[in-house]
């Protein structure tokens, strides 16, 4: 027979990781974080649900941070009407977007629209600052990883630019 | 058709708002105390949050950090109150040993004579007899002593409120980031990022205001203590200087009126310590203005402290943390004072600052409604 007392004392031991932590582990911004740090991060992350066709954010709106797709899919577009809409990217589970807003106060540079019922994880400037205040080691790890991701994207843009110039 | 729908929506909203206000006015007497406790707890949390966060960063445990900060505050506060009470009772005992009622009345009569002698002739005619003045002053002292007993009940009520505020503050400090997250979670998707920014701006505005106020109170306390010690060098015979300084610093938190309230304890102590001392009674400020018991010296010292604080220290420390027009500050103080008394005056400026932030965000949202 199971004892409720012992069950409560050892509650949380050998517990499997949550779906949130599982999603966060796929994001390069959170690579090399320990399990304890993932749990710390999970406390700050915001869960948001969007129906198909809902805007996550609109082009030129104020941006406060990044989103990670936990479930569903999102398209990044310019223009909202069906005739002038150009799709820049289609993102699915584990992908992330809007990370530039973590660093600057500039407005969003594109629309983000849910293409099916989706659950997103939000990580915002204020969360990063709180983390920096409460657990600077974790905050620095994330900032360093963010720098790496942005550097990688810049390198990608550069090679596309070089390719475009050489094709002229 | 659209126009009609808009009118209906507007009427519906106005009726709903009126019902809301009516309902709030009915339940307000029952919830006002709790709301006040929560507001106090929130303000204390805002002041202490960065200390708890910094300690958590060092020891890695939120609960222990809250406990350590709260214990430290309790020890400092307990030591302050304890030594204040013991020194005050010593002061009162000493005063009552030195002065009996007859001597007090004689002193008042002497003081009345001196004041009348110093007045210009046309003002002397306006004065009633000196005996009346001495009688009234004695009466005021006796009434004050008599009303001390009724203060006991008020102190009991204050202790209850203080305990509740203390408990709320501990809970808020321990769970602040969780509460904040829950609040953010209820914002609809459409207003999510705007709401997030609004909460952040309110937090920033309140915490920078409170930190600025704390630093300016500290500077007033330090300068007042220094000023009182300087006055003692000239024979003012002031005791409890540190307590007077701290009270002046705390009173300074209430704009416009506070600085004058801060002078009262110093004047009382000067009076208590110097009564019966002929040199202090006949003291002249700069050898020109009669300043019995150094009263005008004390007032001048506090005025100098306030000028330094208001013109040099606060602009440097606080800057434009809330950025309110002086006229708006005065209106806010009057409204706060009318609704909640001295407490309302204490909260009037930060509350107006918060309203200003909200108003600014609403204007921004209205302007950019197409982006939501």
Image (spheres, coloured by chain):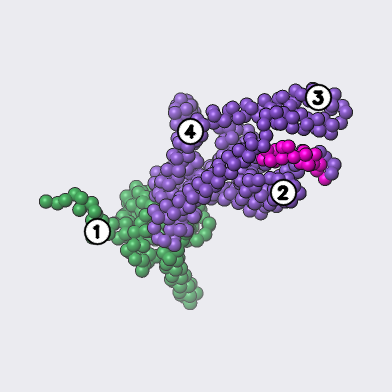
Separation of marks 4 and 1 at Cα, in angstroms: 46 Å
Q: Which residue is mark 2?
A: B232
Q: Position of residue B278 (x, y in %)?
A: 77, 39
Label 3 belongs to which residue? B127
Numbered disc total: 4
Q: Residue at x 79, y 22 (%)?
A: B128
Name the image quarter holding residue B327.
top right
Which of the two discs, 4 and 3, labels the residue nearer the N terminus? 3
Q: Residue furthest bottom?
A: A166
Residue at the right extreme? Answer: B121
Using the numbered discs, state the Cα–Cα distance from disc 1 to disc 3 in whole angstroms: 85 Å
Give the chain letter at badge 3. B
- Please, what secondary structure does the residue beneath circle 2 have? helix
Same chain for labels 1 and 2? Say yes or no: no
What residue is pinned by disc 4? B157
**Does the image show residue B112?**
yes
The residue that disc 1 covers is A13
Chain A visual colour: green
Mark 2 residue crowding within 10 angstroms, few (<14) / some (14–19) / many (20+): some
Q: Quadrant of residue B139?
A: top right
Mark in the foreground, 4 or 3: 3
Q: Is residue A85 visible?
A: no
Marks 3/2: CA–CA distance? 33 Å
Q: Give me the chain that's purple.
A: B
Residue at disc 4, secondary structure:
helix
Q: Is the residue at mark 4 from the same chain as the one at mark 3?
A: yes
Q: Position of residue A161 (x, y in %)?
A: 48, 72
**Residue interval drawn in magenta:** B268-286
Q: Which mark is residue B219?
A: none
Q: Are marks 1 and 2 in contact (CB under 8 Å)?
A: no
């Amino acid at each position: 027979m199971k004892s409720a007392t012992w069950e409560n004392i050892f509650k949380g031991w050998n517990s499997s990781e949550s779906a949130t932590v599982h999603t966060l582990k796929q994001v390069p911004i959170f690579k090399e974080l320990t399990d304890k740090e993932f749990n710390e991060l999970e406390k700050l992350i915001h869960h948001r649900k969007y129906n198909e066709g809902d805007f996550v954010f609109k082009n030129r709106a104020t941006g406060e941070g990044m989103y990670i797709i936990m479930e569903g899919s999102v398209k990044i577009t310019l223009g909202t009407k069906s005739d002038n809409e150009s799709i820049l990217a289609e993102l699915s589970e584990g992908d992330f977007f809007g990370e530039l807003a973590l660093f600057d106060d500039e407005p969003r540079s594109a629309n983000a629209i849910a293409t099916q019922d989706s659950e997103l994880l939000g990580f915002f400037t204020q969360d990063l600052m709180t983390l920096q205040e409460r657990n600077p080691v974790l905050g620095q790890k994330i900032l360093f990883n963010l720098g790496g991701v942005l550097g990688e994207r810049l390198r990608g843009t550069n090679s596309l630019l070089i390719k475009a110039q050489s094709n002229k | 058709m659209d126009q009609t729908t808009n009118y209906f929506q507007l009427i519906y909203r106005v009726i709903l708002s009126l019902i809301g206000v009516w309902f709030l006015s009915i339940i307000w007497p029952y919830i006002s105390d709790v709301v006040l406790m929560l507001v106090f707890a929130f303000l204390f949390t805002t002041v202490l949050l960065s200390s708890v966060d910094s300690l958590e960063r060092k020891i890695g445990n939120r609960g222990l950090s809250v406990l350590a900060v709260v214990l430290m505050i309790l020890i400092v506060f307990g030591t302050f109150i304890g030594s204040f009470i013991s020194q005050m009772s010593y002061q009162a005992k000493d005063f009552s040993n030195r002065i009996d009622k007859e001597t007090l009345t004689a002193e008042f009569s002497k003081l009345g004579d001196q004041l009348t002698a110093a007045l210009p002739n046309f003002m002397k005619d306006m004065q009633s007899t000196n005996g009346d003045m001495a009688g009234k002053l004695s009466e005021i002292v006796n009434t004050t002593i008599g009303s001390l007993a009724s203060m006991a009940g008020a102190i009991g009520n204050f202790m209850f409120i203080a305990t509740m505020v203390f408990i709320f503050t501990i809970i808020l400090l321990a769970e602040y980031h969780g509460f904040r997250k829950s609040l953010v979670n209820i914002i609809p998707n459409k207003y999510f990022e705007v709401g997030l920014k609004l909460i952040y701006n309110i937090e920033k505005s309140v915490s920078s205001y409170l930190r600025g106020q704390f630093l300016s109170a500290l500077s007033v306390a330090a300068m007042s203590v220094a000023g009182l010690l300087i006055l003692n060098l000239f024979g003012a015979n002031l005791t409890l200087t540190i307590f007077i300084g701290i009270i002046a610093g705390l009173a300074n938190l209430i704009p416009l009126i506070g600085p004058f309230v801060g002078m009262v304890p110093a004047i009382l102590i000067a009076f208590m310590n110097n009564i019966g001392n002929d040199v202090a009674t006949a003291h002249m400020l700069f050898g020109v203005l009669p300043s019995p018991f150094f009263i005008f010296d004390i007032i001048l010292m506090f005025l100098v402290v306030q000028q330094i604080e208001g013109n040099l220290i606060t602009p440097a420390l606080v800057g434009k943390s809330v950025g309110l027009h002086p006229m708006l500050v005065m209106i806010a103080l009057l409204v706060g004072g009318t609704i909640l008394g001295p407490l309302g005056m204490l909260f009037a400026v930060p509350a107006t600052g918060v309203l200003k932030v909200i108003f600014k965000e609403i204007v921004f949202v209205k302007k950019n409604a197409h982006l939501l």
